[in-house]
Image: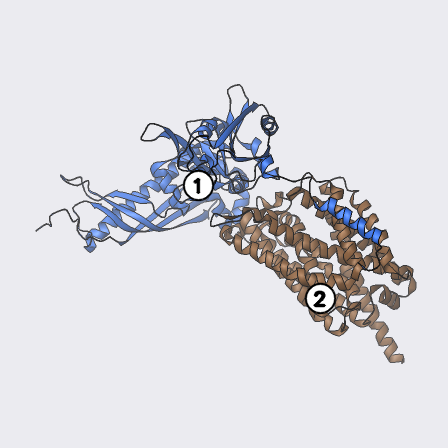
Chain colours: A brown, B blue
Amino acid sequence: MKVTGLQVFWMIFTMEVGMTLVMTLTPGVQAAKQDLWISLLLAGCMTLGITALVTNVAQLYPGQDLIRFSQAILGKWIGGIVVIVYLVQWYTILPIVLRQFTDAIQIMILPLTPKTAIMLIMILLICYATYAGGIVSIARCSEVLGPVVILMIVLVLAASVNNVDAKNLLPVYADTGAMKIFKGSLPSASYLGHSVEYMMLAAFLYQPASGKRYAYWAAAAAAFTVLIAMTMTLMTIGVNLSPKLWYPFFEMSRKISVLGFVENLDPLTVITWVTSVFVKLAIYLFITAYGTAEFLGIKNWRNLVWWIAPVIIGFALIPQNISQATANYLLNYWVPIALPVNMIGLPLLLLVVGKIKNRGSQASG
Amino acid sequence: MKGLGTLKRCAVLAISCTLLAGCWDRKEMDDIALVMASAIDQLGDGQIELSLQIALPTGIPGTLQTGGKGQKPVLVVAVKGKNAHELIGQAQQQLSRKLFFGHRGVIIFGEEYARRGITEVLDTLLRFPDSRYNSFFLTARGASAKEILTTPYHLELIPAIGMKIMQNSQYTVGVKIDRFLDHLAADGTMPYSGAIRIVKDAQGEPTFQIDQVAVYRENKLAGYLSGKSLQAFKMIKGMGKGMKLTAEVEPKGPETQGTITADVLSVRSKIRAFYVKGTPSFDLTVNVDSRGLANDSTLDISKTPNLLRAEKALTDELNERLTDLLTLTQREFKSDVVGFGRELHIEHPKAWKKLKKRWTDLYPEVPVRVRARVHLERIGRTQAPGHLELPE
């Protein structure tokens, strides 16, 4: 199973852009109000920082994934604990994303369809994609779907230009201040920080050395797209209404009215979003199955897919309502734990220890 | 699908077929009642009345049938109750088809209901998955909203579509739900909406007209703008294009009214906020570019001094209208519908933090300096009025 650098670009981009756009706008606006765009610049910088960390870590042991090099760098036990920390992230993000996807579809377009039906369709799809070709089929899917996502976002933004009122961004800074802007950048940063999964993906590259460049571009492109799209949304819907809506980006597309007959474009954004969710879930399902198999020494990771899928559905049904699924997970686990530990702390630890070890082995050898 | 047995393949196929058909949320054209407009009225006994204008599928002629003769194209359903949220369910009980709000173009509030406060319905509008924010808000004047929904309109098949098209044009002030809610939620500006009333046409048949603006104070209707104050309001909001401005340049003569009328080509309005020694004040500048449209005076406005005189007369007229509008909103409506507070917020954010809470009470007293300027860019095809003798 090998993928190209360009495929890695599309995988990271598609995975990050849709989810960030839809899920983190509201918490961001709630904290940073009209200065969200400053928060997003900050979030973009953080993402690039995270990407720099993980690409450097991955370069220490080209051709190996997180599970292997974590144990190679930190030893069997500590490395094992690090892997478990990541497995917790993967096993929790899968059901939560699935649940968020289901909630959004139910709220926006299919209010009467049972949750399990929507979940089942998605789960079957990602299981098939993962089982059939592993990372290769997912990579090819995102190579095709990624440009579609960009096209849809550009279309929606272009059609919204006549609804924009730049005054919604004023006054700058005075209402919020540095702390609130920083707080507003965290939800987006934590979602854009999915480039941390590069540590798993890098192992499958044809040329591990060239992957770094694509990871940077993916993170930068995703952050830029999110910046533009969110700022447009804020200018369209305004700072009074956006923090009260679950999905302001969808609502912006509902407002589109060009020439009196191009209306009701919200299916476009829903397609964008479903695509992004599909790529994200498929990638996570793959790395979870592959990682677990490697960690536990199971020979055929593919069989694990069929074990993990029911677990995901089971967990996805646990949250009682949309607040638990969307807000609580984001604000109680993803931002305070996953962002500092999984995305910054552990990669930094691996990088520092790995570098020292490398130097030590070079000196003694 | 390498590695899957025939049995598994069949299972996958069967599951996909049942799941992907999407029968839970299917909405067939034959099963839905398209709500084109809805209206809410306050009844005397504390109840609320919800009326829905529904497009009748049989009333809409196909390509073969022409003309709307015969059946009426819409049906108006009305239900009464205490709780606005339950009324939709009640209306559904009268209908064999499922109510569908995705194509609703206008929402009308009865005058009395708007005066009592409209918060109750707003939440439903936002929360309802079906409702889109592209609907226009209208406030009825001098009639109940239900009466307006039952008023026939002949130029379009469905009256609600007529209203929507009128609201989309530059001749009326159209406010969509989200803009209204945004103004309502914002500090430093008050919501407004178009106002619709019933008039008689030449045959004495009732028809509706959207020629006014309803001004709200918080969530309650405060009053209506019409005529000259509405013109001034549209100027400030930058919607003045195409408006006519008439001013007196000389005393009424034997043959002439002594007036000049200008057609507005473009308007640039700007509000500057000042905050000196704890008191806010504002400069309101309105610059109008116009072209001479009618000269009902003896002046030859191709001559520079006369042109300047005409410009001055128009400027004074506009100044007066703007001042009148401000007096109306400050003294009578006590509603910052122009949005001075928002400008203060943008230009003096620190001061705004202190004033925000009291703004609604402060607004009626704040001084506003009005500076209008009308520029006549061209004066039409004639120089001196063509029908008058040139003075010797």
**Image coordinates for residue A300, horizontal then vertical, percent:** 88, 61
In which quadrant of the rendered view does residue B82 lie? Answer: top right
Residue A333 appears in the figure: no
Foreground of the two, B169 or B14 = B14
In which quadrant of the rendered view does residue A364 lie? Answer: bottom right
- Indicate the quadrant containing the N terminus of chain A: top left, top right, bottom left or bottom right: bottom right
Q: Which residue is at a point 46% across and 43% down the rendered structure image?
A: B339
The chain containing the residue under callout 1 comes to B
Q: Decide if residue B295 is on the left or right side of residue A244.
A: left
Amino acid type indicated by mark 1: Gln
Indicate the secondary structure of the residue bearing disc 1: helix
**In the orientation shown, which residue stands out farthest toward the front?**
B64
Foreground of the two, B323 or B245 = B245
- Tag count: 2
A252 above or below B358?
Answer: below
**Image coordinates for residue A226, horizontal then vertical, percent:** 62, 57
Indicate the secondary structure of the residue bearing disc 2: helix
Name the residue carrying label 2.
Answer: A7
**Image coordinates for residue B278, horizontal then vertical, percent:** 48, 44
Amino acid type indicated by mark 2: Gln
Give the Cα distance between marks 1 and 2: 49 Å
Q: Decide if residue B70 is on the left or right side of residue B48.
A: left
Give the number of the disc on residue B167.
1
- Indicate the quadrant containing the C terminus of chain A: top left, top right, bottom left or bottom right: bottom right
The chain containing the residue under callout 2 comes to A
**Badge 2, how many Cα within 10 Å: few under 14, some, many 20+?**
many
**In the orientation shown, which residue stands out farthest toward the left?**
B392
In which quadrant of the rendered view does residue B249 lie? Answer: top left
**Badge 1, how many Cα within 10 Å: few under 14, some, many 20+?**
many
Residue B328 appears in the figure: yes
**Image coordinates for residue A211, horizontal then vertical, percent:** 73, 70
B90 above or below A329?
Answer: above
